[in-house]
């Protein structure tokens, strides 16, 4: 990591979790994997504080651990996950636009707490929504549960790995650290909970209903507490799914700018049909037939099957190849070329940066080098139709800023 990234991680950790967690997190970023005793020694922090800080970081998926053959547990910082904290507001706002205020608060609670049970999230969100309602109105647990199920169905939230039951039942000595596993089939399966109730408004911060200050309230016996219906099943926000959604939105916007709104709506429909079945790292979406796409278009979007086929043919013939044809069954099978689409978007961004910094002629040269891969200075002058002196100056400018590189050929 660069020093700027380490500094940014440090500031994010301090803002979200305080100085001790920031100290331990930055130490792990700088040193790599470390066992507990080394972290305690190197940071000069008490073992108890280090353990608590590591618990916080693990709870929020910012640190992972693994057991080595010698039985030593080492902890490693996840720098990329720390930098994602910058995007928390965007994740929350995206959920608000897709699933209204209820979905927004569900994702916000999961991001704030790292991992939570579904029942705890539902009750907390119902209470928060009730606080914002008019007197006499409350939010039903069932309504929040339904939104949570929709978020799980579209993979915006997912189950956390758990300790397998066999590990608990072994009669031998316990391992130095538990091994967490998750069955992919169960990652988005919501437990059947019969949550009945409504959100409650908070009373005075200092007194409860009986007028007793909180500090003097007797502790209730834990034996009287009701068992948690989904105890041990924890959930977290699936940040990779949010990034997939951002990617899809960028592709749809690019198609709208290049062609028209109808083309972008067709591409949006294809992406929506494939969002659950296609892994985020896949180069293509699952093949979709023209008939399937036609049936899945938004209600009220009045285009005929013939017009749809014409649009799909235009999209497949476009030089950018955002859409590709993979077969002729079902009226024609089509896919979204995800990697090619992202490469085209990245190229367009680079070209616009070069044009803004160096002008349109430099952008023309840069575009040529991108297309031809390797060009000699004389070839650049001829292809770009720019005088030799100007071409030389422009190439030097981009070379000094590391936008292009110089390769010396061998005779």
Image (tube, grey):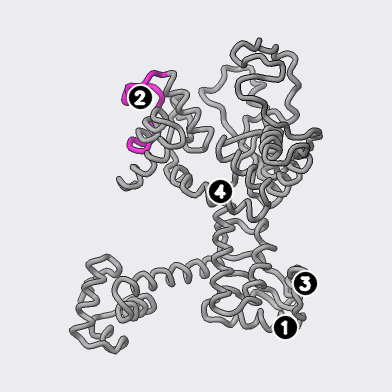
Instruction: Kindly give the residue lying farthest to the left in the view shown.
Output: 389
Considering the image in quadrants, where does the C terminus appear? Answer: bottom left
Please tell me whether residue 121 is drawn above or below residue 151 in the rendered image.
Answer: above
| Residue matched to label 3 | 300
Q: CA distance from mark 1 to mark 3?
A: 15 Å
How far apart are the alpha carbons under marks 4 and 2? 32 Å
Disc 1 secondary structure class: helix
Q: Residue 216's spot in the image, x, y percent?
A: 61, 11
Label 1 with label 4: CB-CB less than 8 Å: no
**Which residue is denoted by mark 4 in the rendering?**
239
Say which residue label 2 marks: 38
Q: Earlier in the sequence, mark 1 or mark 3?
A: 3
Spatial CA span between label 1 and label 4: 37 Å
Quadrant assignment, res 114: top right
**Nearest-to-viewer mark from 4 and 2:** 4
Query: Measured from the top left, where is residue 103 in percent x and y?
Result: 66, 47
In this picture, residue 376 sits left or right of residue 194:
left
The kind of secondary structure element at disc 3 is loop
Q: Which portion, as a residue range, is magenta?
A: 29-47
Q: Residue at point 77% right, 34% down? A: 198
Q: Nearer the viewer, residue 179 or 192?
A: 192
Can residue 141 be seen from the camera position used here? no
For disc 1, the neighbor class at 10 Å (few under 14, some 14 to 19, many from 20) is few
Contact? badges 1 and 2 (CB < 8 Å): no
The disc at residue 307 is 1
Q: CA distance from mark 3 to mark 2?
A: 64 Å
Front one among 172 and 110: 110
Residue 128 at what x, y percent from top left? 66, 37
């Amino acid at each position: 990591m660069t020093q700027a990234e380490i500094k940014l991680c440090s500031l994010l950790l301090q803002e979200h979790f305080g100085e001790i967690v920031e100290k331990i997190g930055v130490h792990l970023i700088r040193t790599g994997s470390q066992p507990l005793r080394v972290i305690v020694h190197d940071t000069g922090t008490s073992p108890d504080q280090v353990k608590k800080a590591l618990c916080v970081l693990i709870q929020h998926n910012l640190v992972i651990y693994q057991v080595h053959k010698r039985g030593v547990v080492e902890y490693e910082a996840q720098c990329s996950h720390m930098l994602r904290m910058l995007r928390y507001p965007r994740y929350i706002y995206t959920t608000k636009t897709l699933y209204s205020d209820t979905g927004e608060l569900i994702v916000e609670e999961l991001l704030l707490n790292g991992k939570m049970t579904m029942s705890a999230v539902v009750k907390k969100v119902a209470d928060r929504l009730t606080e914002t309602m008019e007197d006499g109105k409350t939010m039903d647990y069932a309504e929040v549960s339904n939104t949570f199920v929709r978020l799980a169905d579209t993979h915006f939230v997912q189950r956390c790995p758990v300790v397998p039951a066999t590990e608990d039942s072994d009669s031998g000595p316990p391992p130095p650290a538990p091994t967490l596993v998750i069955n992919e089939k169960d990652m988005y399966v919501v437990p059947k909970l019969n949550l009945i109730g409504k959100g409650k408004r908070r009373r005075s911060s200092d007194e409860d209903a009986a007028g007793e200050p909180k500090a003097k309230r007797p502790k209730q016996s834990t034996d009287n507490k009701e068992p948690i219906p989904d105890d041990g099943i924890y959930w977290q926000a699936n940040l990779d799914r949010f990034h997939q959604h951002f990617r899809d939105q960028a592709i749809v916007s690019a198609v709208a700018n290049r062609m028209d709104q109808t083309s972008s709506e067709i591409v949006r429909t294809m992406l929506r049909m494939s969002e659950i079945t296609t892994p985020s790292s896949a180069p293509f979406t699952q093949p979709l037939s023209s008939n399937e796409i036609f049936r899945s278009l938004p209600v009220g979007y009045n285009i005929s099957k013939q017009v749809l086929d014409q649009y799909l043919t235009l999209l497949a013939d476009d030089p950018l190849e955002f859409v590709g044809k993979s077969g002729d069954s079902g009226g024609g099978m089509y896919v979204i070329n995800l990697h090619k689409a992202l490469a085209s978007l990245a190229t367009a961004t680079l070209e616009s940066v070069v044009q803004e910094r160096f002008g349109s002629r430099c952008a023309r040269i840069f575009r040529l080098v991108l297309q031809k891969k390797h060009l000699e200075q004389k070839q650049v002058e001829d292809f770009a139709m720019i005088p030799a002196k100007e071409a030389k100056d422009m190439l030097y400018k981009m070379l000094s800023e590391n936008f292009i590189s110089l390769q010396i050929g061998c005779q």
